[in-house]
Amino acid sequence: MISRQELIFRLSSPMLEEDSSPVALDKRRYATTPASVLIPILNASEDPTLPDWHLLFTHRTDQVADHKSQVSFPGGRADPHDNGPEATALREAYEEIGLKPQNVQVIGKLAQLPTITRYLVTPVIGLIPWPYEFILQPKEVSQVFTIPLGWLADPGNHTVRQIGNATPAEGKAAFLREVIFFKAYQGETLWGVSAEITVRLIQKLSG
């Protein structure tokens, strides 16, 4: 497994270039609300010389406005007082799961990603200590859990599906999009925007 020094080196390099295709540009044009998520990376190994890197995810409740009951990274929309996307990601992580900003070592960012709910999301990458005593916001997060980075990096554990309507319904236009789905891991299914962010992180790690 990759060392801490190498992990930081690879993920602190300049963020991936934005997709400049007409479709991507059109999506970003309609993504009018800035937001950020934190990608928390932790070492689950008791031996620091043999790191076992995991990503931390949240399971959202059915009481939130968007992406109900889905697996996601901690995060949310930017506040006017936030000093950049890193500040948004750290504030949201503290509000949602009690992760204190001073306990996060921010090491990089990924390219902004537009969502179907018209958010323009900046993924912020941060190393966090483990184990950690999280304090969950019960209206937003039902639990936190981790998935090994090695498992996520296995291409056999995710696929791309087309969802939507291939043919127009009465009063509605045809709508079809490609969405990344991971296999279920200990009962949790990572898919959608969070899955796409995860794949982009893995691509950055692999160079």
Image: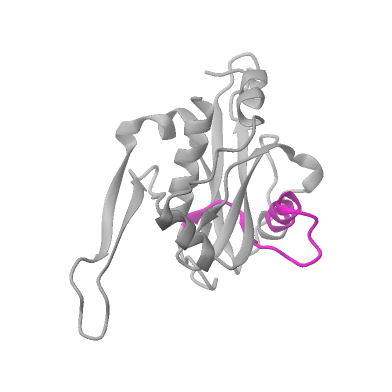
Give the mark count: 0
Q: Which residues are magenta?
A: 71-94
Horizontal side of 88 relative to 149 (left or right) equals right
- Type of colouring: one colour
The residue lying at 25 percent from left, 86 percent from top is 171
Residue 138, by quadrant, is bottom right
Q: Is residue 24 visible?
A: yes
Task: Find the residue positioned furthest to the left.
Answer: 167
Where 180 sits versus 91, above or below?
above
Residue 76 part of the magenta-drawn span: yes
Q: Position of residue 10 (x, y in %)?
A: 60, 25
The residue lying at 68 percent from left, 49 percent from top is 134
Q: Position of residue 155 (x, y in %)?
A: 34, 32
Q: Nearer the viewer, residue 182 or 58?
A: 182
Where 167 sits versus 44, above or below?
below
The residue lying at 77 percent from left, 48 percent from top is 100
Horizontal side of 131 relative to 155 (left or right) equals right
Horizontal side of 4 relative to 160 (left or right) equals right
